[in-house]
Amino acid sequence: MDRLQTAIEKAREQRAEVLKERANNGPLTDVGFLPETVEQLPSRDEIWQGLQSVDMNARALKDLRLMSNQGASQAVPYDLLRTRVLHQARQNGWRHIGIVSPTAACGKTTAAANLAFAFSHQPEVHMLLLDLDLRRPRLAGMMGQKIETGMEDVLLGRVPFADHARRLGNNVAIGFNNGPSDRPSELLQSAQTEERIAEITEQFDPDLVLIDLPPMMSTDDNFGFLSKVDAVLLMVAAEESTTEQIEVALRQLGELTTVMGIVLNKCRHTGGAYGYDNKYYYS
């Protein structure tokens, strides 16, 4: 948390220096130097509205199990999860939240996509969703998006995030991938990635940044990155994730960051406290 916050403060200071220089000198134009003021810079809403929008039809949403866009009872589980995440983040001053799982096939990317739709229905909250599962990215395919560039291009400075990201509704921006990275572990653990995320956070000023990360036990990709986030959600699969896997993941995560909660996914129980067929349990 401290490292990423320091990087954000550095990006903010650099931006302030640029603004000061522009105000003093002005950009060179055909009619000489004209001062550029802070008021002339685009607002947060203008920056977000400049993003290309995500386009998905209702059938695709249903086929891909992105149920939080359907409304009514189908959206309740993810609406509840969204509210719990947002409440804890505000209460603790957290901004960057990782989403991880002990192993593959625990439903973390499906949950991340559904949370994106859930947040898009809460327009006063701006949220970024970044697919940093660079070894096996699935978010773009899951949401039916054809993307020419990936988050690797953004992190390496090949393309600005504003040109790459897609906007869901008016308040959710998503960083997809167009394929796996050649060196995902080294990229995630690099200082350059830390700086890029700080720059994106400073530019887009989101209330929350959710980061879809690789499974804990598959690679070492997460171990140099998790210390840079404020907290993580651990997704586990009912009747699939073993107690040993969960305990090992919790122990590893506890050494790197804060576990804000465990989500039991792929679990169906009828009725319950909320009167719906809920598909997860949050603790």
Image: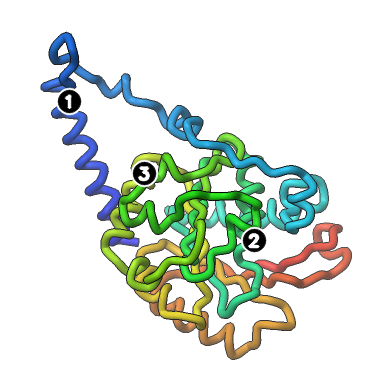
Count numbered badges in the picture: 3
Cα distance, mark 1 to mark 2? 43 Å
In terms of sequence position, does the residue under pointer 2 or pointer 3 come before the other?
A: 2
On screen, residue 66 versus residue 209, left or right, reads right
* Residue 14 x %, y %: 20, 41
Quarter of the image for the N terminus: give it: bottom left
On screen, residue 68 versus residue 137, left or right, reads right
- Label of residue 102 in the image: none
* Residue 177 x %, y %: 50, 57
Residue 85: quarter of image: bottom right
Around disc 1, counting alpha carbons within 10 Å, would you say few (fewer than 14), some (14 to 19), or many (20 or more)? some
Cα distance, mark 1 to mark 3? 21 Å
The type of residue carrying mark 2 is: Ala
The residue under the point 22% across, 48% down is: 10
Q: Are dots 2 and 3 in contact, CB under 8 Å?
A: no
- Label of residue 22 in the image: 1
Residue 66 appearing in the image? yes
Q: Residue farthest to the top?
A: 31
Cα distance, mark 2 to mark 3? 27 Å
Q: Are dots 1 and 3 in contact, CB under 8 Å?
A: no
Q: Which residue is mark 3?
A: 160
Q: Which residue is mark 2?
A: 111
In terms of sequence position, does the residue under pointer 1 or pointer 3 come before the other?
A: 1
The type of residue carrying mark 1 is: Arg
- Tell us which disc is closer to us: 2 or 3: 3
* Residue 221 x %, y %: 41, 74
Residue 226 appearing in the image? no
The residue under the point 44% across, 78% down is: 254
The residue under the point 71% across, 68% down is: 281
